[in-house]
Image (tube, rainbow, N blue to C red):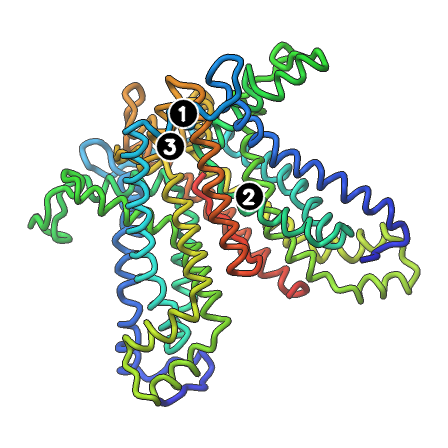
Amino acid sequence: MAQTTLPASRPPAAPLNVKKWLGVLPFFLFAVLFLIWPSARLMVDAFLNPEGRFTLANLFELFRNQTIVNSYLLSIKISAVTAIGGGIFGFFLAYSVTIGGLPKPLRSILITFSAVASNFAGVPLAFAFVATLGRTGFITAILKNIFDINIYQTGFNLYSFLGLSLTYMYFQFPLMVLIMAPALDALKTEWREAAQNLGATALQYWWHVALPILMPSIIGTMFLLFANSFGAYATAYALTGGSLPLITIQLRAQISGDVLHNPSLGYAMAMGMIIIMAVSTTGYIWLQSRSERWLK
Amino acid sequence: MKIFSGLRSISLWSGFWYLLGVLYFILPLYATFDFSMRLERDKYNFVAYQKAFADPNFLKTFAYSNILAAVTIVISLLLVVPTSYWIRLRLPEARRIVEYITTLAIVIPAIVMGFGLVSVYGAPINLPFTSIQLTDSLLNTRLGTNFIIIMGYTVLALPLMYRSIDTGMRTIDVRTLTEAAQSLGANWTTIIVRVILPNLRASILSGALLTFAIVVGEVTISSIMNVPAFSPYLWLLGQHKAYEPAALSFASFLMIWASMGIIQIVTGGRAQAAGAH
């Protein structure tokens, strides 16, 4: 078999090319039929009025309708809070089992738990938090019986922004752990030794060497966590039953609900969501590729 | 490993975060388990589990979700393995665009994809730019609905499945294996089934288990398409019962734990996250 050792950038001969691409045809066909066409269809429908004519009204409505603006803001807020909070917490956890000096077996336990927790979402996760922090939840009861603190009288409510954020954290920080642990492993001991030889303190080493190297990876992963929570629907719906008007909840009400029913507006909302998801996913990919300069 | 001179304070600092992490992981699970054991007043037993598992609707929806998962796994593998293999072997120039498409599957939220599928396949499909009808709405029949939902799940699982398989392909030398097999007279089917697949066992298993976790836990698309799947059933059960849903939630945690545990063992610690939240 002839081996091409040409660099990938130089296009090979044309007739050969077509035959080679047939091998990936099923994949592209699948992607067009079940991923690209359905999403493109929603985007096109966002520009149509109920009579099927072109309109920009749905798009303007996204910015004019205060309910929709607020639900975007609420989703952005909860995604930012859980991405930053989960990112910081996950970073310290990843630190503790990599260069933080904890014994090896603790690391395997943490990584397995993180893999489980980042996949434990939706209805079971919501029910687990009801059992923990609900009105008769485990922690609620402990705080009441042992410390005499009734968190529901101090204004806490599981079915609120804070409650949902705590629930989202359960799948957010484990994802950070899974991505940051390898990145922290890649910090070379030579860098620290070099810094120490030049008389740097631990703080100076972190501030001037380690953090600047890790920053693209940290911020990048936070972008991923943001997207992870921005597109979430199941957990929020199962926990709050739709009382917290996130954009995903509003979107569903708009497209298939009984009260609000304006599918075209719903499609415009979906388009806005895709744009925000695309921006944060691109941010993740771009920063992750930048971080590979130092961390291989 | 000694990092700084103040090893002791470092370990304390690490220990503090680790403990906090472990508490965050364990407490909700313990609380769920504890609650699920209290169905009978003043007793601590597994009655909630017995009741939950004996419910015929549980059996029906759980079996249905497992079948969906199994078919999704087979279709994902049929789609991803040959594509990834072909790209490694002959078509490196397609890598970029295929990776771009798998990223697109992350960018489109599940709820948007659900409505997208309904909007395309919930209506009669015409030949493009004509009024010649090709099929009636696929979502009118059960078979059609099952087909569309499986395709939707395949899209949801695509990023993880692709990454699992592609990582596996990278660690084996696809070209050398293929050429060795060819020079011994093997045909394409033999090469894929008897040479490539056995070398990808760990990747296939981890991709399959991640897909399983996604499909059985999925509630967004299944509720949009109104199919009798496990997670919508669990949600509905939670509306009028207290202990049984807790029991099933704890059981699904154990199921995910088993899946991820197997992945950790077969891949030696490469962990991934699904993301059907």
- Amino acid type, mark 3: Phe
Are the residues tagged 1 and 3 within 8 Å (C-beta)?
no
Give the residue at mark 2.
A225
Helix, strand or loop at mark 1 = loop
- The residue shown at (31%, 50%) is B70
Helix, strand or loop at mark 2 = helix
Give the residue at mark 1.
A65
Q: Position of residue B256 (x, y in %)?
A: 47, 43
Q: What separation in Å lies between label 2 and label 3 (alpha carbons)?
A: 29 Å
Q: Position of residue B133 (x, y in %)?
A: 8, 48
- The residue shown at (57%, 24%) is A132
Q: Exactly how many numbered labels are in the figure?
A: 3
Helix, strand or loop at mark 3 = helix
Q: Nearer the viewer, mark 1 or mark 3?
A: 1
- The residue shown at (64%, 60%) is A291
Which quarter of the figure has residue A226?
Answer: top right
Vertical comparison of A29 with B25: above or below: below
Q: Nearer the viewer, residue B214 or B35?
A: B35
Give the residue at mark 3.
A60
Quarter in which the N terminus of chain A is drawn: bottom left
Vertical comparison of A80 with B87: above or below: above
Q: Nearer the viewer, residue A34 or B35?
A: B35
Q: Nearer the viewer, residue A46 or A248?
A: A248
Q: Is residue A292 left or right of residue A35?
A: right
Q: Are marks 1 and 3 on the same chain?
A: yes
Q: Nearer the viewer, mark 1 or mark 2?
A: 2
